[in-house]
Amino acid sequence: MKVSAIKDGTVIDHIPARSLFKVISILKLDRVENPVTFGNNLESVKLGKKAIIKISDVFFDEKEINKIALVAPEAKLNIIRNYEVVEKKVVTVPDEVVGIVKCYNPRCITNHENIITRFSIVSKKEVLLRCHYCDKIIDQDHIEIIR
Ligand code: CTP
Ligand code: ZN
């Protein structure tokens, strides 16, 4: 075990290494007061290199945690109570993404006016988003999170 076990909280495993900081950003973990530990570039048979995040004493609601599916669709959540894994969950890509992702098109109106971004999901397997305003398609690796 490369990152020590926690007593209570949430372990997010099987995050692609390149998505670790996007997940931290989506869940606003830089603003959490609880202990947060993470490991990056750990060996994974499935992902090549993976990341793992452990957040003590925090249990996310489903809507909040599903946002990470945009950048880590294969992530697995483990709910830990008294050192035991009491529940395992997968994340699911939402049908619509509002106000989380920046449009990649520099000419898009959302990059010039104070408009909340909005994307529909074109594909959930290999995540693809379409901007509601300019129709630009954004793939998983070009998803930029709005802070
Ligand atoms: N874990 C933890 N603290 C605990 C118990 C588990 O941080 N008290 C972490 C483990 O390190 C692991 C994840 O939670 O990363 C899931 O634990 P477990 O189901 O025991 O591991 P695996 O069987 O390897 O999980 P899977 O194959 O489902 O990813
Ligand atoms: Zn756009």
Image (spheres, rainbow, N blue to C red):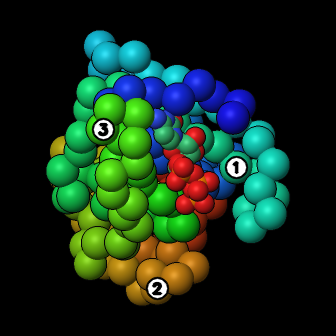
From this view, report whether residue 14 is shown above or below residue 35: below
- Under tag 1, what secondary structure? strand
Badge 2 crowding class, 10 Å Cα cut-off, few under 14, some 14 to 19, many 20 or more, is: few
Q: Quadrant of the C terminus?
A: top left
Q: How many marks?
A: 3
Residue wearing tag 1 = 50
Residue wearing tag 3 = 81
Badge 3 crowding class, 10 Å Cα cut-off, few under 14, some 14 to 19, many 20 or more, is: some
Q: Nearer the viewer, mark 2 or mark 1?
A: 1
**Could you tell me how far apart the alpha carbons at marks 2 and 1 are, in whole angstroms?**
23 Å
Badge 2 vs badge 1, beta-carbon distance below 8 Å:
no
**Of 50 and 5, the residue lying toward us:** 5
Q: Residue at x 23, y 44 (%)?
A: 60
Badge 2 vs badge 3, beta-carbon distance below 8 Å:
no
**Could you tell me how far apart the alpha carbons at marks 2 and 3 are, in whole angstroms?**
35 Å
**Of 4 and 116, the residue lying toward us:** 4
Q: Residue at x 37, y 63 (%)?
A: 89
Return the mark for residue 123: 2
* Quadrant position of residue 124: bottom left
**Residue 103 location in percent, x, y?**
42, 58
Badge 1 crowding class, 10 Å Cα cut-off, few under 14, some 14 to 19, many 20 or more, is: many
- Under tag 3, what secondary structure? strand
The amino acid type found where label 2 is placed reads Ser
Q: Residue at x 49, y 77 (%)?
A: 128
